[in-house]
Image: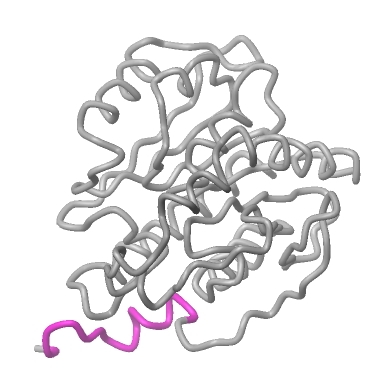
Amino acid sequence: MAPENTFSSCCLKSFAWDETPTGHDTTLSNIPTYITGTNPNAAVLYIHDALGWKFINARLLADHFAREANVTVYIPDFFGGEELDQVAILEGRFHDVDLRGFQTRNAREVREPEIFACAKTLRENGYKKIGAVGYCFGGWAVLRLAARPPLVDAVVVGHPSWLTESDLEGISVPVQFLAPETDRVFTDELKLHAFQKLVLGKPRGVDGKGLPVEWVHFPDVAHGCLTKGDEKVDGEREAMIRGKDAAVDWFRQWLT
């Protein structure tokens, strides 16, 4: 039996933990952006969490999406060049981070116009299919992109923060939720409301048919697991791999 918090070689092969990101930095809608992949017809807008657009796991996830779903992935810097202390965040030392000021400087009303502009630019650049994936901070944003009239064709929402009930109104493209069991911000009440609204409420998509919704539950892990993949936290790396695989399958289904 393998020691606790270690993984077999077959498990580790399913994610490039120790690789160097293969994309490059450019701009999208005049915003510094990491881009990976070469598909001229299908793109994914990746809206990052508090760890930012340079976070190694974000870029590795983007590389996986590009390779496995055959899409071109863009991760713009939606924090205006501001970078929080990644080590402090990963170690849970939030008292060492100016979260209050950060939230003010990067409030929804500040960043939403930039996010919308990036999605519109992708469409103007000729992509026939556009998806969006958002983790934590990015979760509310991809739902806004999915609301009527939608700017994208499918979205993936990973342990969203800053989400309100009104963000679930008017969703009209296929949506996948990646939901860890323990989450202080995507609470049980919000999860229930989302499920009731988007599944039991039987909303219609832009094609007039029933809205495809997929709910992926991650037991025994907490908010942030889908991007942090902390090898010191039992189950986090497996959850991140499973979340990556689920998102890849979703994009394959709706962007091809």
What colour scheme does the image use? one colour
Question: Quarter-wise, where is residue 187 in the image?
Answer: top left
On the rendered image, what quadrant is the C terminus found in?
top right
Question: Quarter-wise, where is residue 206 in the image?
Answer: top right
Residue 48 position, x and y percent, is: 55, 56
Residue 138 higher or lower than 56, as above or below: above
Q: Residue at x 24, y 46 (%)?
A: 183
Viewer-nearest residue: 57 or 154: 57
Viewer-nearest residue: 209 or 168: 168
Residue 209 position, x and y percent, is: 57, 13
Q: Residue at x 9, y 88 (%)?
A: 1
Instruction: Tell me: 87 left or right of 230.
Output: right
Which residues make up the magenta segment?
2-16
Considering every residue shown, the one lying at the far right of the view is 125
Instruction: Tell me: 220 left or right of 81.
Output: left
Q: How many marks?
A: 0
Residue 155 position, x and y percent, is: 56, 38
Q: Residue at x 42, y 60 (%)?
A: 98
Q: Main secondary structure of the magenta part?
A: loop
